[in-house]
Amino acid sequence: MINPTLGVCYYPEHWPEEVWEQDAARIAEVGIGFVRIGEFAWSRLEPTPGELRFDWIIRSMDVMGRHGLKVVFGTPTATPPRWMVDKHPDMLAVDAHGRQKGFGSRRHYDFSHLGYRDEAARITQLLADAVGDHPALTGWQTDNEYGCHGTTYSYTPAAKAGFQRWLADRYGTVAALNQAWGNVFWSMEYNRFDQIELPNLLVCEPAPAHDLDFRRYASDQVAAFNKVQYDILKARRPDLPVIHNFMSRYTEFDHYDLAETLDIASWDSYPLGHLAVSNEPDEVKRQYMRQGDPDNAAFHHDLYRTVGHGRWWVMEQQPGPVNWAQFNPDPLPGMARLWAWEAFAHGAEVVSYFRWRQAPFAQEQMHAGLLRPDSEPAPAYHEASQVAQELKAVGLSGTANKGRVAIVFDYQSEWAWEVQPQAKGFSHAAHVRALYAAFRRHGLDIDILPPGTTSFAGYAIVAIPALFAWSDALRTAIAAFDGHVLIGPRTGSKTENFAIPPKLAPDLPRNLLDLQVIRIDSLDPSVEIEVRGSGAVHHWRERIETRANIVIEDVDGWPVLVNQGKLYYLGGTGTKALVHRVVDYLIAEADVPTLALPAGVRCRTRDGVRIYVNYNAGPATLTLAKDETGYVLGTAEVPAAGVTIARLATAG
């Protein structure tokens, strides 16, 4: 664990060697302590097969070290050079339509291709041997943004053969697979594992269990690819952390599984780009066009803190306009500072800006950096320097406080409801984020938990939304929990093999919840069913039979929120008004203290302070909370894109 500090991504291969020294001096002058290098440099490290040229990148590390900078070295396996494709032409991925992807950008490999996996291991080992003892080296990054551009799923012969082996290992016999998948339906039964195709290019949809197992297989391949590099790097330097940079709203592989072979999780935070390409309503996109969704980055901070077992970074922080969204606005002045402080509020060890200097060439030439292409400071240069000075003044250490509220987030539930959405517009992730935002607007600290959680001790409220299938551990954790639990909708509506459970959803013992979902009403996206009191149900509505207490019902008399003891069940996806109503009711029932935050202001606590950030385009006024003794940074008047930090009466 390190005290919070800043980093930056640097590409020595992009610049003449004579500017490295000046760049390193300026990076250190800003107050940046970490530099990531190397993750896209394979063609310069090995221009032809076996021709190793590591001297230049070692010299760049020498330069960084002379200026007190610590280096995170990225393995270059996200961008194999052209000669690698010539050597392994079948390593190129194939999309779901059967089209082979080509060379000329990045991430042009199939995770299932064992020959390329061996090549990735080879270059990782060579680099570990070459730079492993360099005094500036402080950690490793594996590859870059696994799965970016939709590259987790590939439909190559290598993937087909690997999937068949994976199925044989999972089921043992074809008869067991046929039973699990329900292959008696439509006469889909197999005689041998080598008869099984990939779930693409079919006349209509595959069996849901077939599709889900392919996604499980693909996820396992990403984790296996990472493990190869992790094992090599840890064997060479067991004292150095291994990191990977995940992404926003990306769920095609199970990040919890992959992180079993990581020491630190990180992610790449581009709030404006992520909002522009999101499915958020147009009014939200207009309101926060220059700030980003006030809850999206925070959700991922909390998610990746859990993925990293408490240790996490932002490896790439947006500093200005990006190049890859439908539109790429200039951030509101102050946002590069706000985004960094918000990450630190959620426990980040390092916030690393992407990138040091804007590139004047190639695909990302319109992506801003801390410097303009002419090496003059861009606005974020000064904001990063301000953050560095403020970090010293505030003196943060440790990590984020444990939340009062926890939300279970499950990658397999994401896959399952993509396989079988049943209702256009239904989204597991959107449902989770809506609950997260509803709790967060009250100033509550929130933790994201994996579906394998065995205890909810210490939390006041736990939400388990749209969970595909129960694990025994999760059922046991609920039964032993004394706090309030919010479940649903769709939770427990399937078994692990994607079948409807014999007792129907939510598939819980009657002593916990005497309730059955007996029918589904999948609504046209333009239709909303009003709820008595306020709010409405849309997309998904469940017909519930229950002897439990009905708290909220819709205008048709269908139960919407039901409770039995401290367990609550939500029988539909709702509008923002309904989600807020349900969350407000649960907070009141659990008697959880809240804050009266101005609209657009968010906060989180760590290290005896509460850090407020203002996502508004105008100022906001805070009221000193009962547990706060005063402000250590900023004041109660928080300007647009401003940050205020309050000292808590008691740390923890």
Image (cartoon, rainbow, N blue to C red):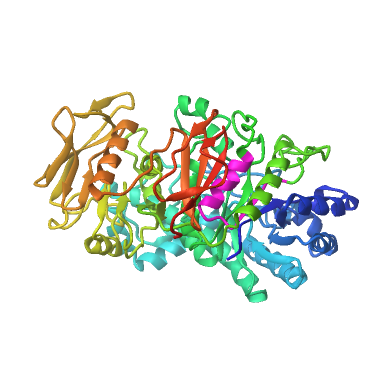
Query: Where does the image place residue 111, in percent across and percent down from the top left?
Result: 57, 57
Name the side, left or right, on which 338 lies relative to 627.
right
Magenta includes 354? yes
Q: Residue at x 35, y 60 (%)?
A: 191
Magenta includes 483? no
Q: Residue at x 61, y 65 (%)?
A: 242
- Find the residue positioned furthest to the right: 18
- Find the residue positioned furthest to the left: 547
Q: Nearer the viewer, residue 99 or 418?
A: 418
Name the side, left or right, on which 449 lies relative to 185.
right
Q: Is residue 103 visible?
A: no
In the rendered image of this protein, does residue 64 appear above or below residue 384? below
Residue 365 falls in which quadrant of the image? top right
Q: Where are the magenta residues, as a range?
A: 336-355
Q: Nearer the viewer, residue 318 or 649?
A: 649
Query: Where does the image place residue 179, in percent across and percent down from the top left?
Result: 27, 59
Query: Where does the image place residue 196, in percent across and percent down from the top left?
Result: 41, 55
Query: Where does the image place residue 169, in percent across and percent down from the top left?
Result: 41, 68
Name the side, left or right, on which 103 lies relative to 597.
right
